Image (tube, rainbow, N blue to C red):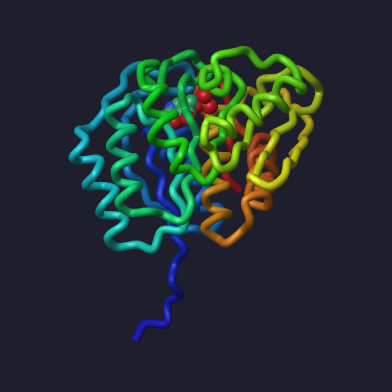
Amino acid sequence: MSNQRRAICALTIAGSDSGGGAGIQADLKTFAAHGVHGLSAIAALTAQNTRAVTAVNVPPTAFLHAQIDACFDDFRIGAVKLGMLANARVIHAVADALERHRPKHVVLDPVMVASSGARLLDPAALNALRSRLIPLATVITPNIPEAELLLGHTIVSGADADRALAELRALGARAVLLKGGHLQGREMTDRLDDGRRRHAFVHARLKVEGHGTGCTLASAIAAQLSLGQSLAGACAAAADYVHGALVHASRPGKGKVAVLDHF
Ligand code: PLP
């Protein structure tokens, strides 16, 4: 008889970053740092380093389904994190799989464009994201440019961001964490509407261009939810985790972007 404890598991369905800073690689490091066993279904592969994304390959839908089904058939999954999904075909495939497996929590990072400028989602896929995935999410975690694309207007001030939070909820999201890193100011504020009330998570702005911060935040939220945290508690802890990981970030490549330290 084995007396080993049952592991808590979280699944990331996202893109691979060959440079190890973002995507699946950041997600698995984040899960591990939270003591959660990380599972992954790779929705897209990127050839990428600290300077650029040089190629993208999207595996066949049947293979993505095989990865997701293999995970759900064996592990008790506390939360699913969704990252780079590349195009509408992949979004529909992931939505079909989630409707079949019905995980308790889904954290949707609506990844669209990398900070390097590389497109990680076909613009024609925005409608599929809105209609298929946003309604399945426990929380969506757009940054300001992603929220602008979802809403079709600019967000330049804190007051705009407050209004955008309500507009994003009106798209059918149960909860919204709007990341404030792209707004001006010495502090940065992440705003959460958890479906009942609003919260603000404020951190000093650091002079570091972090790579994979969005991926890390969303997977830290998924890890915390799978550990049983409330949504507001998970988002607060995840925002603190990303801040700490940025404080200790390093530059492993020749580009100026830094990768986070997954302590
Ligand atoms: N590559 C992959 C596979 C990603 O999922 C993401 C972000 O979600 C990025 C790159 C972009 O990361 P960043 O914009 O933080 O550089």
Quadrant assignment, res 218:
top right
Which is more toward the observer, 173 or 2?
173
Residue beneath the point at 41% across and 36% down: 133
Q: Is residue 22 left or right of residue 94?
A: right
Could you say where residue 203 lies in the image, as x and y percent from the top left?
77, 35
Could you say where residue 70 lies in the image, as x and y percent from the top left?
25, 54
Could you say where residue 46 lies in the image, as x and y percent from the top left?
35, 26
Residue positioned most to the bottom: 1
Residue beneath the point at 72% across and 45% down: 197
Residue beneath the point at 42% across and 82% down: 3
For the N terminus, the image quarter is bottom left
- Whether 226 is drawn above or below 99: the answer is below
Q: Is residue 162 left or right of residue 252?
A: right
- Whether 230 is drawn above or below 182: the answer is below
Residue 191 seen in the figure: yes
Residue beneath the point at 38% across and 35% down: 132
- Whether 81 is drawn above or below 172: the answer is below
Residue positioned most to the right: 186
Which is more toward the observer, 126 or 214?
126
Number of labels in the image equals 0
- Whether 172 is drawn above or below 105: the answer is above
Q: Is residue 186 left or right of residue 20?
A: right
Residue 256 seen in the figure: no
Quadrant assignment, res 229:
bottom right
Could you say where residue 169 lies in the image, as x and y percent from the top left?
59, 34
